[in-house]
Amino acid sequence: MGLRGWALFLAGLLLLAFIFSHPLALHLRSGMPYSFLPVPGLELLHQHPGDYLQLMYRFWLFEKALEGRTAFFSNAFEFSTPRTPPTFVTQGIPISFLFMLFMPLGNIAAYNALVVLSFLAAGAAMALREGLRVNAGHGLTYWNVRSALALPGLEELNIGHSIISRAVLVGLERAVREMKELIRLGPEEPFGSSQGRVKRI
């Protein structure tokens, strides 16, 4: 998948992030998701208990460690007494580094940026793991197939209905030959410059 293909893929993941985390987009600077599936009518609660607050606390510890006000990988404030040493905590590392990049937006917005980025990271990781390919089909015809060829990273075309419909009029051999000729002509470019020819017909 080329650069443009990745850009479109990540844009789609960003859209999914906002759909599945709704109403997060309306509260990027004022609220944080506390549950994957909040109770209907209780989507917006003030400081509802949950792991998200614990994670924010870890980020806060990391920030204090960067400022030199506490030691790295320690928690001197929670469950500590003068007779017990500070407990070891990761302080959210390595995610804390990303959190610090978004800190100029504010703590809540930085946290929500990580929520949105998690969709992109998960989707990109799955695409890389599965070797995501770009194929086109369903609705391709003799009139639009050359436009589809301009899609970046296109590897395969799946055309059936249009060819069989044409074959009723001109025979299967001619219908297939005409489609292959259109594909060999290469792309028309309504989507921008072509990234190459389709690999499988």
Image (spheres, grey):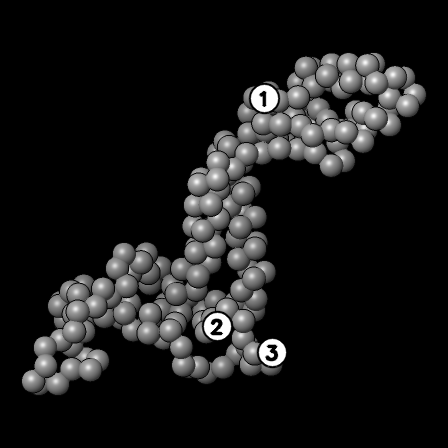
Residue 199 badge: 1
Residue at 81% over, 25% down: 163
Q: Are marks 1 and 2 in contact (CB under 8 Å)?
A: no
Residue 40 badge: 3
Left or right, residue 171 beside residue 105 = right
Q: Label 2 amino acid?
A: Ser
Residue 141 badge: none
Name the N-terminal-most of marks 1 and 2. 2
Q: Label 2: which residue?
A: 35
Which quarter shows the C terminus?
Answer: top right
Place residue 71 in its image quadrant.
bottom left
Give the Cα separation between the discs numbered 3 and 2: 12 Å
Q: Label 1 amino acid?
A: Lys
Q: Where is residue 107 in the image (x, y as percent from the top left)?
A: 36, 69
Q: In this view, does 126 lie above or below 75?
A: above
Q: Position of residue 19 (x, y in %)?
A: 59, 60
Left or right, residue 191 beside residue 78 = right
| Crowd rating for badge 2 (residues with CA inside 10 Å; few <14, some 14–19, many 20+) | some
